[in-house]
Image (cartoon, coloured by chain):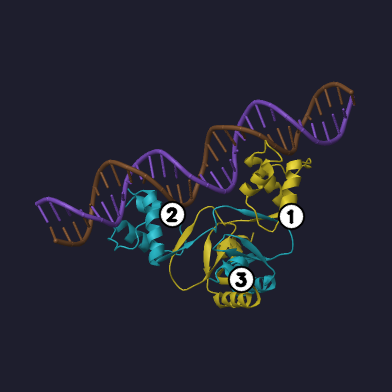
Chain colours: A yellow, B cyan, C purple, D brown
DNA sequence: TAGTTAATAGGAATCATTCCTATTCTTAAG
DNA sequence: CTTAAGAATAGGAATGATTCCTATTAACTA
């Protein structure tokens, strides 16, 4: 990865940032690639990804990820939220605030022109054992 | 897909459900496959996926998905939540309840043994134009 | 017991993303 | 202005989770 040292300027990277600043469409890498293909006929998708990573590291843009690359499954039980441990990748069930989420969903539907049917609330941080391990 | 008609019993599917009910680890398909490989030497990963889909449709298990298959990007601005339109796949920025999320995060950290640093709240439903289109 | 049809195994195909390498470009020094 | 150094790029191969396809196997039913 190309962090740490000073970065050289790059027309492609500048244009990617401009594009993202000019739209509220939350584009995918492929969309950006399509947009810039005319302007940079030799543009490569890999380079779009590379520059997106750099821009994220610079704090200029944010990545809205689908979460991890693989799906997980659980038996059906009472509704609950999850805590994703960023240290060990565990997913912990939380008993907490399902009602709070429903409340927020209602509030959204009252105030806005949308019709939200459900919401997903996920916490990120450290699970119990990883919190314990940090006492060193 | 094999829905609609009556489903035949299946040792593999039964065991997958048992496994998921016996653990709170939120396994991946690959993990399930590894677990059952000894028991069913000829088990295929494709069949694990197939049975997971069936179990989800039956409502016996839930899929914790990473969201969509591709990542999206946005320029950095004020923190906000998103509404994902399930009809047109648009992602809409919401102004609403960022403080509420922080509040919930704090509450979680006070009550539990975890250390959550951030949370993600996403709403799913219909965006403005898709709500409008439904007036038919 | 035989026939029908679902379930399965196995592997090929997909698709977003990452990785690798040779080439090109930018920049700074001489 | 020229050139050397190294970053940025293009292009394509590799990866990894998931889906799709097909021939085979197994379970229910008449």
Q: Position of residue D4 (x, y in %)?
A: 80, 24
Q: What chain is tagged by disc 3?
A: A
Q: CA distance from mark 1 to mark 2?
A: 40 Å
Q: What chain is tagged by disc 1?
A: A
Residue at image position (71%, 56%) is: A23
Q: What chain is tagged by disc 2?
A: B
Residue identified by numbered label 2: B29
Q: Position of residue A99 (x, y in %)?
A: 56, 78
Image mark count: 3
Q: Is residue C7 above or below residue B135?
A: above
The crowd level at tag 3 (other Cα within 10 Å; few <14, some 14-19, many 20+) is many
The crowd level at tag 1 (other Cα within 10 Å; few <14, some 14-19, many 20+) is few
Query: Which quarter of the rendering shows the C terminus of chain A?
Result: bottom right
Residue identified by numbered label 1: A22
Tell me which label, 3 or 1, sits earlier in the chain: 1
Q: Of discs 2 and 3, which sits in the foreground?
A: 3
Q: Is residue A33 above or below residue B96?
A: above
- Please state if A109 lies on the left or on the right of A71 as rendered: right
Q: Of discs 1 and 2, which sits in the foreground?
A: 1
Q: Position of residue A43 (x, y in %)?
A: 67, 38
Q: CA distance from mark 2 to mark 3?
A: 34 Å
Residue at image position (73%, 58%) is: B76
Residue identified by numbered label 3: A114
Residue at image position (66%, 44%) is: A48
Q: Pick whichever, D19 or A96, lies toward us.
A: D19
């Amino acid at each position: 990865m190309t962090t740490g040292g000073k970065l050289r300027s790059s027309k492609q990277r500048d244009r990617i940032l401009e594009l993202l600043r000019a739209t509220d469409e939350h584009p995918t890498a492929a969309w950006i690639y399509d947009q810039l293909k005319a302007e940079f006929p030799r543009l490569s998708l890999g380079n779009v990804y590379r520059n997106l990573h750099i821009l994220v590291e610079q704090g200029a843009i944010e990545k809205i990820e689908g979460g991890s690359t693989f799906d997980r499954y659980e038996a059906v039980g009472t509704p609950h939220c999850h805590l994703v441990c960023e240290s060990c990748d565990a997913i912990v069930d939380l008993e907490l605030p399902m009602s709070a989420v429903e409340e927020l969903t209602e509030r959204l539907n009252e105030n806005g022109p949308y019709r939200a049917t459900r919401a997903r609330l996920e916490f990120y941080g450290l699970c119990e054992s990883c919190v314990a391990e940090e006492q060193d």
